[in-house]
Amino acid sequence: MTKITETIDARKRRARKIQAGLHKLYPDAGCALEHADPLELLIATILSAQSTDETVNKVTPVLFKRFKSPRAIVNAPADTIEGIIHSTGFFRQKAKSIQGACRKIVDEFSGDVPGNMDDLLTLPGVARKTANVVLGTAFGKNEGFVVDTHIGRLATRMHLTWSSRDAKDAVKIERDLMELFARKEWTFLGHALIQHGRRVCSARKPQCDKCTLADQCPSAGSFEADKSTRTSKRTPATR
Ligand code: SF4
């Protein structure tokens, strides 16, 4: 078992092995949110907070068929948007964020989703996680590391972050992951870690006995339910 006191160089070496393992396991890892352009991905990512990709993928075709531009979304009655996105949860807050983001895109960015971090972060409802999804997947830019609930959990269990047990500190976890992995890998690794979290290293029942990354994981075999992942933060504020 690797000690949590390992040096940064040792952790980087271990991270490279985990990276190689993830490439082998999930060579085609990609974004599961269906989208045709940056605006659709932005909206789908906002909707995905505290929801599932499957639910979002059922909702967005209806939304995008009815409202084909940011201006059309701005001009739509809020309750119509809310009705369409209702099943994703937190529908009032999400409708407000989507319409607010579209308003800003129309007013300040000529109707186009901005392709840089600073501008994306000015959009209502958009924090680093959403901005990283949009930049990495829609613009092909590795500006940061997506940290969602899966990645926070896996980074903590695999000791890829110095934030120890605090899997909720997304900003710190992102910074640690960016330090460990090469920039060109950030987007791929985000997708691959999410897949691994869904398929093998789930919150309640990590299948360490079937995990091909176990040799590089300090938590392998010694895992008891990670209490930090049991407390669901029922708020969409972690976007
Ligand atoms: S060994 Fe267990 S805790 Fe570590 S990544 Fe694999 S499933 Fe998760």
Image (cartoon, rainbow, N blue to C red):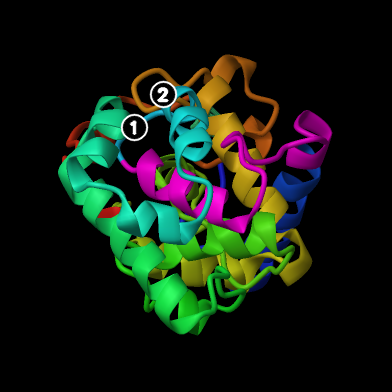
State the image quarter where residue 26 is shown. top right
Residue denoted by label 2: 55
Amino acid type, label 2: Thr
Q: Position of residue 106 (x, y in %)?
A: 45, 72
Residue drawn 22% across and 55% down?
A: 96
Q: Nearer the viewer, residue 206 or 107?
A: 107
Q: Which numbered marker is on residue 233? A: none
Residue denoted by label 1: 51
Q: Position of residue 200 (x, y in %)?
A: 55, 22
Is 36 included in the stretch rendered in magenta?
yes
Q: Secondary structure beneath disc 1?
A: loop
Res. 117 visible in picture: yes
**The residue carrying mark 2 has its beta carbon less than 8 Å from ligand 1:** no
Q: Are marks 1 and 2 in contact (CB under 8 Å)?
A: yes
Residue drawn 38% across and 74% down?
A: 104
Q: Position of residue 238 (x, y in %)?
A: 29, 55
Residue drawn 45% across and 72% down?
A: 105
The answer to whether 164 is drawn above or below residue 224 in the figure is: below
Res. 14 visible in picture: no
Instruction: Specify the segment rendered in magenta.
Output: 22-49
Amino acid type, label 1: Ser
Is 156 included in the stretch rendered in magenta?
no
Q: Residues within 10 Å of mark 2 (few under 14, many from 20)?
A: some
